Amino acid sequence: MAAPWWDAIAGPLNLIDLVEGWIRGTLAGDIVGHRIALPHPQSDWWEENPGVQFWNAGDTKRLLESYHIYTYAHGFNDTEIWFHVLTRQARWAEYLLYRAGVPVIMDTVDGRNVTWANNPAHGGQMPARWDDRETHSAPDWAEREG
């Protein structure tokens, strides 16, 4: 199942998302950021990889935003959908995406993330979000005087 032909034309001409990405990137102090792409929902990639769980851009961005990772500069064409994350958050974002099983198409930020994300020690669970932890206070050792 190929993506509609008009996605190949309309995606790159989407000036609203282009301008929005430039403005939000400028305000965040990271215009370029790190590009994260997913296979287009209607691309042939899904037929070629039938065992992979489907993730769309909205679900992926919600996952990252739940860990306070800023996403911006969204776009699409007939093979991919993408967005950017801040360069300083790219390593953590990559780890979370690999750990969740999101089929990302991106330049690797840290090659160790694949190994760490596939470590059976975490039991297949996502790491606790900072907001979900029982306490937000500093650990005991941080409060001791030296």
Image (cartoon, rainbow, N blue to C red):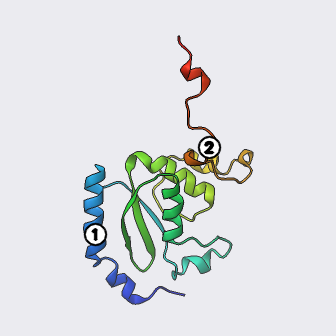
User: Looking at the image, is mark 1 or mark 2 nearer the viewer?
Assistant: 2
Q: Amino acid at mark 2?
A: Arg
Image-based side of 67 in relation to 133, left or right? left
Q: Amino acid at mark 1?
A: Leu
Q: What is the crowding at mark 1: few (fewer than 14 residues within 10 Å), some, or many (at least 20)?
A: some
Q: What is the crowding at mark 2: few (fewer than 14 residues within 10 Å), some, or many (at least 20)?
A: few
Residue 25: horizontal and vertical position, in percent? 29, 56
Residue 34: horizontal and vertical position, in percent? 39, 55
**Element carrying mark 1:** helix
Quadrant in the rendering for residue 31:
bottom left
Single out the residue that lies furthest toward the top: 146
**Are the residues tagged 1 and 2 within 8 Å (C-beta)?**
no
- Residue at 28 percent across and 69 percent down: it is 18
Q: Which residue is mark 2?
A: 133
**Element carrying mark 2:** loop
Q: Quadrant of the N terminus?
A: bottom right
Q: Which residue is mark 1?
A: 18
- Looking at this view, is 56 or 117 the one in front? 56
Q: Is residue 136 above or below residue 52?
A: above
- Residue at 64 percent across and 52 percent down: it is 126
- Looking at this view, is 86 or 34 the one in front? 86
Q: Is residue 115 above or below residue 84?
A: above
- Residue at 40 percent across and 45 percent down: it is 88
